[in-house]
Amino acid sequence: MRALPLLDIGTRMTVVRLPDGGLLLHSPVEADAPTRAAVDALGPVRFVCAPNRVHHLYAGGWKTAYPDARLLGAPGLARKRRDLRFDGELGDAPDPAWGGVLDTLLLRGAPWLDEVAFLHRPTRTLLLTDSAFHPTPASRRGLRIWTTVSRVRGGFGPNAVARLAIRDRAAFRASLERVLAWDFDRVVVTHGEVLESGGEQALRRAYAWLPGG
């Protein structure tokens, strides 16, 4: 993904194995041949999830490659991407086919993003898309430049764009508190490195500026 011309910040797609052996793709990247081959080695693709109103560009490619997979999008995405046929909308109710291993929650109050957070319960892992970035010295140069320019504070958290996307602070804070009540320690972000531990405390600190924390 390029935040600015020639500035490649990198994007992570997370692959979740469901209890039946099928796969859920979170925040899909380009469905090129090497990536499809790597995914095929893990199992059959059952779900393709575009978790906010920004990370949807490659969802159609995966749906084309795996027509039997269900395509799920963030609220409002079906109206934005009328060229795609969505099979459902992400929200606060996880799909029963996920076998109870995933929880989901819409982060309300930021309609430009309408991001849906995911919790992988067995590994206590939170999946975030643009609600938090985690640049480290090991990250690609483009991401380190972008997160500096866009003011990611404290090395983990939202950038200025994500902060400005929050139009109803009370609604977003209420959603965030529900996420913080989940049992998680690890955080997988779409941009940056995986935060292996201390995720709940890091997320709480990252949004301490938001009233109600």
Image: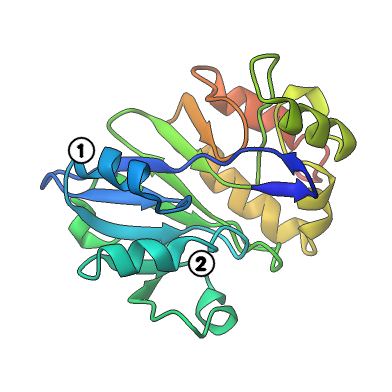
Find the distance from the CA under tag 1 to the CA under tag 2.
25 Å
Q: Does residue 35 appear left or right of residue 111 in this picture?
A: left
Amino acid at dot 1: Leu
**In the image, residue 153 above or below residue 43:** above
Q: Residue 130 at what x, y percent from top left? A: 64, 47
Q: Which of 13 and 61 is in front in this view?
A: 61
Say few, some or many: other residues with alpha carbon within 10 Å of mark 2 (under 14 / 14 to 19 / 20 or more). many
| Secondary element type, mark 2 | loop
Q: Does residue 99 appear left or right of residue 170 in this picture?
A: left
Q: Nearer the viewer, residue 171 or 14?
A: 14
Q: Report the disc number at residue 74.
A: 2
* Residue depicted at 57% across the width and 46% down the height: 129
Q: Which of 96 and 13 is in front in this view?
A: 13
Q: Do the residues labelled 1 and 2 touch (CB within 8 Å)?
A: no
Q: Report the disc number at residue 7.
A: none
**In the image, residue 31 above or below residue 89:** above
Amino acid at dot 2: Ala
* Residue depicted at 36% across the width and 50% down the height: 25
Does residue 93 appear in this view?
A: no
Q: Residue 137 at what x, y percent from top left? A: 70, 14
Mark 1, mark 2: which one is toward the viewer? Answer: 1
Q: Which of marks 2 and 1 precedes in the sequence?
A: 1
| Secondary element type, mark 1 | loop
Q: By what rule are the colours in the image chosen?
A: rainbow
Q: Residue 140 at what x, y percent from top left? A: 67, 25
Does residue 47 appear in this view?
A: yes
Circle 1 residue: 42
Q: Quadrant of residue 9?
A: top right
